[in-house]
Each structure stands twice: as structure tokens, then as C-alpha cells.
């Protein structure tokens, strides 16, 4: 036998030499859920180990993550039902607790990279990412105005990256224009470029209590059957000024990550979503899968597929393990 591939696997040292992909803590971004009030920590039942935190606790959590080498955070607000309305008006009310908290986080930790989410669903009585009319249609251009106002108010808090997760057409350019017109040309945009209408978002919607009140998200989020369509979305986001292209979810969409990595020069991000986290945690709790190895193998697969940035609820655990 002339070729014996096992020779390159025979010792840990040789395996290290030929190792093609390495996950490092600086690749990770940690999504977090912010609660209004003080001294609150409420575990998300469907996401064991993940807690919704009030600002005081979140500041502590961010500090401990920074000490582990995690420098990027994606912060989502848990919005009480009483603050919700049809047009998500709290989303661009500068006195709303989420926006105040972002200011505080950036004041405490200017070195942290903070990303915010632009979509109406957590603030909307309809639970949709855009404006819903009487017939249940999601109105694109009317939504842009609200998303633009939301993005600007978030940028004003000093955060680093705007994350439009709403999948309305034209939103990246719309937001880029508003940011630039108001002096926020240095605020980045990580576009949820290929965001699929996925069942893997279930636990996230539990965390934020943000599930759609009627219908589904199939008229704006992508059909899981489609790959080529991701190219159309990516071309638009690139032209419209996005700084990062995101694929979401990650594990069931590694081919999409690879496709965008091979065809675009912008950094690719993968969102390892709530349902992907829940699956591993549930199996690990039952003793059916080994938690740490399964976690690291799935994060590694996202990087191997071509994601440079990985948003994951495993970020802290993975960083602890890598330390
Ligand atoms: C909402 C939003 C969702 C997620 C991030 N932003 C859910 C949805 O579109 O319904 C999902 C994240 C996750 O599942 O971890 N715009």
C-alpha cells in the first residue's frame, strides 16, 4: 500500500500538525437575553444553563466572559407584554430599558463588541418582525421606517454592530443610509443574510415570549429547501453595504455557509440557534450524548464550513473548555 492516510493520525503531535481548522475563543459571539429590573436571573426552561438577566447581573456575566476571552455579545431584550404594541414603539423609545442598558454596558466595557437586534417581534403585539396589516400581510416598506428608527436609536447608545434579523427587503441599505446621515458611519451591520423559516428558533421564542400570534414567518424568512436563493440575498446585502453576512440556523445549513464562504469576500457569520443548543443539552442531560465533545464538534463544523464568526449560546462553556 503506497497510501496509508492513518500515518497522519498516528500521534497527537502529528494530528496537530495536519489539523486544518481550529476554533478559537475570539471567533465566538455570545447571545444574551436582557430583563428589565434588578437582581433577576430566570433560566430559560428549554435552554438549560441560559438565563435571562437583569442589567446588574448581565454586567457581571459580561465581565466574566471578557476574562475568558469572549469579546463579542449580541443582546436581546425581553419585553413585557404591557410594553408591546402594534408598531413596536418601544423599540425606538430612547428611554426604554434596553437602550438605557446598552449605554451602560458600553460605558462599563468600552472594549466589548456589542451587537443589537433589529426586528419588531419582541416589541410587537403581533410577534412578527414587521408591520402586520388587517389581512395578516407583513408590510415591507412600512416596516423599514420602524426598523430604521430602531437601528438609529440603538446606534445612538454607542453599540458596535447592528444586527437586522427581520428579513425585510432593502433593509440593509435603508439602515446604512440612516446611520450615515446621522453620523454613525462607523456603526457596522451584520446582516442576517440567509435566515431560514426554521423550527429551530422555538426555545428563543420561549425566552423572549416572542412567537408570532398568528401565521408563520414564511413570507419573509427563507424556505429551508433553497440554497441558490441565498446567493441573491448575499449579493443584495453586499451591494447594500453589509459588513458581515450571516447564515441562520447553522448546523442544518452548513452547505449555505460554505456556499457564501466560497462566493463572497465578506466575513461569514453562523448563528448556532437556540434549538441547536437545546438538542445537545437535552441529550446530554439524558446521558445520551457527551456534552463537551458534542458542543465542540458542532462549533468546529461551523468554522470548517466557512464561518469566521459563530454566535452561540455555548460561547461561555466553550471558552471555559478552551482555556
Ligand atoms: C427575531 C429573531 C429570532 C432569532 C433571532 N432573532 C427568532 C425568529 O426569527 O423567530 C432566533 C435565535 C435563536 O433561535 O437562537 N427576529
Image (spheres, rainbow, N blue to C red):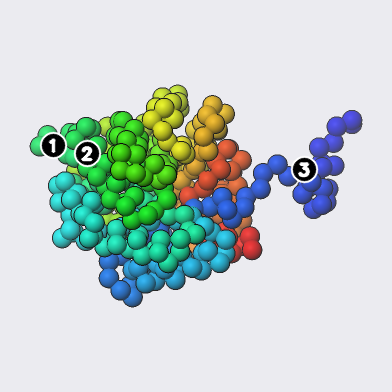
In the picture, which quadrant includes the C terminus? bottom right
Q: In this view, does 14 lie above or below 235?
A: below
Q: Marks 2/3: CA distance?
A: 51 Å
**Residue 234 at what x, y percent from top left?**
44, 29
Note whether residue 157 is visible: yes
Q: Is residue 79 above or below residue 189?
A: below
Identify which residue, 63 or 33, lies in the foreground: 63
Q: Which residue is drawn at 82% across and 48% down?
A: 14
Q: Which residue is drawn at 42% across and 44% down?
A: 186
Report which quarter residue 133 is drawn in: top left
Q: Which residue lies furthest to the right in this view?
A: 2
Q: Is mark 3 on a helix, strand or loop?
A: loop
Left or right of 161 in this view: 142: left
Q: Residue 18 carries which label?
A: 3
| Sequence order check, earlier mark of 2 and 3 | 3
Q: Name the residue under label 2.
A: 145
Q: Marks 3/1: CA distance?
A: 56 Å
Count numbered badges in the picture: 3
Q: Name the residue under label 1.
A: 133
Identify which residue, 181 or 45, lies in the foreground: 181
Q: Dot 1, how many residues are within 10 Å of its Cα: few (below 14), some (14-19), or many (20+)?
A: few
Left or right of 253 in this view: 296: right
Which numbered mark, 2 or 1, is in the foreground of this view?
2
Q: Dot 2, how many residues are within 10 Å of its Cα: few (below 14), some (14-19), or many (20+)?
A: some
In the picture, which quadrant includes the N terminus? top right
Q: Marks 2/1: CA distance?
A: 15 Å
Identify which residue, 112 or 279, lies in the foreground: 112
Q: Which residue is drawn at 21% across and 54% down?
A: 93
Q: Residue at x 22, y 60 (%)?
A: 95
- Asked if ligand 1 lies within 8 A of label 2, the reply is no
**Residue 50 at what x, y percent from top left?**
42, 63
**Residue 222 at what x, y percent from top left?**
36, 32
Amino acid at each position: 500500500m503506497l497510501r496509508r492516510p492513518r500515518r497522519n493520525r498516528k500521534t497527537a503531535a502529528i494530528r496537530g500538525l495536519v489539523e486544518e481548522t481550529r476554533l478559537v475563543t475570539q471567533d465566538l459571539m455570545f447571545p444574551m437575553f436582557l430583563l428589565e429590573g434588578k437582581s433577576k436571573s430566570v433560566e430559560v426552561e428549554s435552554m438549560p444553563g441560559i438565563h435571562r438577566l437583569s442589567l446588574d447581573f448581565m454586567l457581571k456575566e459580561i465581565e466574566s466572559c471578557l476574562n475568558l476571552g469572549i469579546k463579542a455579545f449580541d443582546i436581546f431584550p425581553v419585553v413585557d407584554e404591557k410594553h408591546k404594541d402594534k408598531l413596536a414603539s418601544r423599540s425606538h423609545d430612547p428611554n426604554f430599558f434596553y437602550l438605557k442598558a446598552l449605554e451602560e454596558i458600553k460605558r462599563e466595557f468600552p472594549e466589548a463588541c456589542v451587537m443589537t437586534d433589529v426586528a419588531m417581534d419582541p416589541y410587537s403585539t403581533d410577534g412578527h418582525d414587521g408591520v402586520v396589516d388587517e389581512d395578516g400581510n407583513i408590510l415591507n416598506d412600512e416596516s423599514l421606517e420602524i426598523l430604521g428608527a430602531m437601528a438609529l436609536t440603538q446606534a445612538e447608545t454607542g453599540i458596535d454592530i447592528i444586527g437586522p434579523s427581520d428579513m425585510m427587503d432593502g433593509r440593509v441599505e435603508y439602515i446604512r443610509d440612516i446611520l450615515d446621515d446621522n453620523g454613525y458611519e462607523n456603526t457596522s451591520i451584520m446582516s442576517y443574510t440567509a435566515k431560514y423559516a426554521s423550527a429551530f428558533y422555538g426555545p428563543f421564542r420561549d425566552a423572549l415570549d416572542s412567537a408570532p400570534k398568528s401565521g408563520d414567518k414564511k413570507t419573509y424568512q427563507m424556505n429551508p429547501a433553497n440554497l441558490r436563493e441565498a446567493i441573491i440575498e448575499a449579493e443584495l446585502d453586499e451591494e447594500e453595504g453589509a459588513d458581515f453576512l450571516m447564515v441562520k440556523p447553522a448546523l442544518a445549513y452548513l452547505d449555505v455557509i460554505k456556499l457564501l464562504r466560497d462566493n463572497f469576500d465578506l466575513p461569514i457569520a453562523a448563528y448556532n440557534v437556540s434549538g441547536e443548543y437545546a438538542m445537545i443539552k437535552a441529550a446530554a442531560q439524558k446521558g445520551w450524548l457527551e456534552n463537551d465533545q458534542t458542543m465542540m464538534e458542532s462549533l468546529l463544523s461551523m468554522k470548517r464550513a466557512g464561518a469566521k464568526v459563530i454566535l452561540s449560546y455555548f460561547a461561555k462553556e466553550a471558552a471555559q473548555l478552551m482555556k
